[in-house]
Structure formats: C-alpha cells, structure tokens
Image (tube, rainbow, N blue to C red):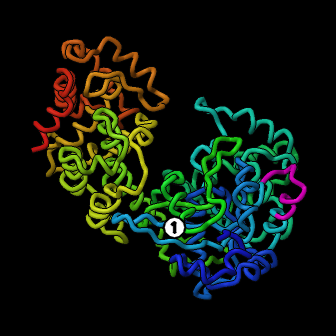
Amino acid sequence: MKLSYQGIQDVHNYTMNGVKLPSFDWQQMADKTAEAPVWVHFGAGNIFRGFIAGLQQKLLNTGDADAGIIAAETFDYDIIDMIYAPHDAMTLMVALKPDGSTDMEVIASIARGLKADCQNVVDWPVLCEAFRNPSLQMASFTITEKGYAVTTPAGELTGLVQADIAAGPLKARHAMSVVAAMLLERFRAGAYPIAMVSMDNCSHNGEKLRQAVLTIIDGWVEQGYCPAAFAAYVADEATVSFPWTMIDKITPRPANVIRDQLTGLGFDDMEPVVTGKGTYIAPFVNAEVPQYLVVEDRFPNGRPALEKAGVYFCDRETVNMTERMKVTTCLNPLHTALAVYGCLLGYTSIADEMKDPELAKLVKTIGYTEGLPVVTDPGIIDPKKFIDEVVRQRLPNPFIPDMPQRIATDTSQKVGIRFGETIKAYLASPTLDVQRLTAIPLALAGWLRYLVAVDDRGEPMQCSADPLLEELQNQLAGVKLSAPASLEGKLEPVLKNANIFGVDLVRAGLAEKIIGYVREMLAGPGAVRRTLKKYLV
C-alpha cells in the first residue's frame, strides 16, 4: 500500500487493514483550497500533522468544511521534499492506546506543503497569493517557542532579525519576518482581517507572536519599506487578532516498532528520515489519544467550526486559567518530578516509572494532595478528571516512547512555574500551611540531587541540557555522594534565587526541609530510593 492520493484509491486493502480513509476527495479539497484558502499553518511537523490537521479532517469528513489547510514550513525545508511531496501531503496517523492497540487513519486535510522561503520561485508566490485572498480566515503556528525569538537574552535584536529589517520584506528569512511579509501582502491587497493563532506550547503564546511580528514591522516602517498604516493595521486586533491558546498532546518522535507494524501490514516507504537540519520525521505520526486545544475566540474574518472537532473556544482569561491548570498543578509538575527521579533511578521510560510505587505515589501526591487545593479551575475542563487521565492513562501508556532524559531538559527554566506557583498559592492562603508540603519539596530536592550528576547507584550520570547547568553545578562544586557534610552552605544561595524557583524558598520556610531531603539522598548508593520510601508513606 502507498500513502498518496493514488494509493488510497485501493480502498479494499486500506479498510481490510483497519485504516480509516477520508470521506472526501483529496483532489477536490486541494482545488477548493487553492481557489479560496481558509487556513494557512506555519510549522509542518508532527504536532501539526498528528493533531491540528486532524481537526480540519473531521470537518471535511462531515461536510462542515470544503477547504483544507496549506502547510508552510519556515525552518526545515527538507520536510516538504522528503515527507510532504512523495505522499501528496498526507499523513498516516497512528493513535497509541494504553492497552497496546492502535487506531490508524489517513489524514488528508492538508492541501499542499510549501517552503516558506523567499528565494523559492514556486512556493513563495503561492503563499503570497493565499494571504492576498479575502477568504483566508486564519494562520496558525507550531514553530516552537524559539521560533518567536527576535531578541537575545540581553534584549537586543538577533543578527538575523537585524539583517531582515535592513533587507526588507522581499528578503525575509526569520519565521517572524516571513509572517510579517505575508501580512504586508494582505494589507496591500485590501487590508483584509485575519486571525494569527499561535498553537505552540508556551505561556501567552498569542502575545509572543504579536510582539515579535510588530517588532519586525516597526523596523520596516522605520527603514521606509512600508507605511505606518501597515503597522497600525497589524496592531489593531479588530483587523489582525492574536488569540491565546493552550495545546496539550504528547506526540513523540516516530517509533521503529510502529514503522515495523506498518511495514508488516504492507505499507511502502514508511521509513523515518533525518533531514539535513536534524529533524527525525516519518510519513506516519504516532501519538497518544488524549488531546486538548483551547482557543481564545477572536477571529475577525470568521473561522472554521472547530468546536465540532472538539476544540474549546472561550475568552482569554479561560485560556489562561486552563494553561495554569495544566502547567502549575495537573500535568507539567508531575512530568518534571518523574524526569529528574527517572534519571537518578536509571529509568529510560516515563511509563515504566509509573509502575514504580514510590514514583507513582510522588506524582499522585503532587497532583491530587498538594496541587488540587490551589488549582486554577478553568470551568471548561475538570481539574481532577484531567489528573485522573494523566496518572491512569497518559503517563502509564507503555506505547508512548517518552524518556525522562528528554523531559529533564531545561529544568531550571521550568521549576519556577511548575512548582513555584503552587508554593506561592500556599503562602497566600489563609487556610493552607506551606509546611505541610512534602512531595513538591521532594521534587525540588530531587532536581538538586540530580545536578550532582551521580545516579542512585553511585555511577556518573550525564545531565540533560540546561542553560543554567554549568552555573548551578559550579555552585554545587565539591558536593559528593556518601559525604552529606559536603553539602554544607552550598544550597542556601541557590534556594534563595526566586528567578529560578519563582519564590525565595528560604523566606518561604521550605529551605530547611529541601536541604534535609538532599542531605539524606547523598548518604550513599540507594539513598535516593530510601528517602522516597521514608517520606512517601
């Protein structure tokens, strides 16, 4: 079997192998999309192919839409050549269920994959034409948080952005410059309204997108490339809106076991590829079943009826509350706790960690016992049911190939939000006692013990990448396993750093408890396990 428009005409083989096919004609959809585009998406990777494109597919299947999505890749053009072009922009979506079974579906809602490259004489004009069309309602994004970065940590424009501002819209290279250039096309065509919808997994994503695009545009206005009226058009959210969103779905890299399963069913050309820029991608996407997308409902030119596909539409405050629920209490803190302890205890699978009695108790205590009393309830998703799904279905799913070593990346940038917000809520509460917290201090102590770079067996351990790793390890220099006294005076300066933890943990009254936990975990090989057993009773 081949994954392509021609290939899916072999309906018998697809259905005999349990693969769901689109109920619309892909070529007709592609023609309609070219004539009257409704949706352009920037970022052609797995979360888009395995989640977002599937939403429009549902509308196409039910007749609630007749146009698909134009996918535009701003970074890794090999994805278009190696994955999109050979398969008519179709994806084989493989949903990984906790019982080991899978659901398979051909996602055919992408009309075309384009390289968002100003030097590409074929694709660039197509992208410009789509943005000039009054029918276009939205442009969405999954380009990772780094894709919105137009300044250095010092607050200065990056070299690439400076060059783009100097060169003007016709030579845009940075993703945000490309977006600004497309909005200029739309402004010149008639200043038509549009929604610019970041779906990246970062806080206040719509605001990040808006600020980045306006930074480029203001530079172009200053250089004389475009009129001040263009900047006013983009800055007016009655014409160009930047809704906030919250997205949640685990979409790991393509798994070889899924490739082998598909090959065994008779699929041709399912081999994952590594692009020139290091993207590991395949014609299929494997992902968990649960998924959430919450979107601020501000679309000045209308929008697809995505609520019929399971998207939650609401106001900005509800989006913000949903994100806080996920990030500060119900999911992300649990993930981070599993990440650092998984590394210390030699695990390479999050699912395997959930079979560990102490680690399962740790995350359940963080979520149910310590998180729920201060959870931000958004009203549209029940926080307890969300945690139930996380600890019973999502984290224990053995068919999601996710590793603690990956999740431990950049932990210094995460702990302030994932644990600090709950600590602050306890400190502010007239009825809750921060001293009653056990699992959250254990999670923070586990991270500090992790920074010593020695696992619980006493073996050297490589820590995952982190922008503060070198600085923090220098502060802990001299701390050794089997020598708890070496910790003396080392942790107080770290725990005072509210930039890391979101709160001064010394002032919060938790430093003594956290230091005590770390000291116990340094007693010798096996001390991490003994400490968990001691306090998680």
Report the residue marked by disc 1. Answer: 295
| Image-quadrant location for residue 472 | top left
Identity of the residue drawn at 43% across and 64% down: 96
Instruction: Pick whichever, 244 or 449, lies toward us.
Output: 449
Is residue 447 depicted above or below 366 in this figure? above
Give the main secondary structure of the magenta stretch.
Answer: loop
Identity of the residue drawn at 80% across and 65% down: 186
Q: Position of residue 270 (x, y in %)?
A: 62, 59
Q: The N terminus is located in which quarter?
A: bottom right
Q: Position of residue 57 (x, y in %)?
A: 60, 76
Q: Position of residue 64 (x, y in %)?
A: 61, 86
Identity of the residue drawn at 35% across and 55% down: 398
How dense is the environment of label 1, judged by Cα within 10 Å: few (below 14), some, or many (20 and up)?
many
Say left or right for 325 vs 307: left
Which range of residues does the magenta coloring cover?
Answer: 116-126
Is residue 249 depicted above or below 531 in this figure? below
Q: Find numbered disc 1 in the image and state the secondary structure of the residue it sits on.
A: strand
The answer to if 124 sits in the magenta stretch is: yes
Say left or right for 427 vs 258: left
Q: Amino acid at mark 1?
A: Val
Say left or right for 472 vs 156: left
The answer to if 223 sits in the magenta stretch is: no
Q: Residue extending furthest right?
A: 121
| Image-quadrant location for residue 457 | top left
Q: Position of residue 75 (x, y in %)?
A: 70, 47
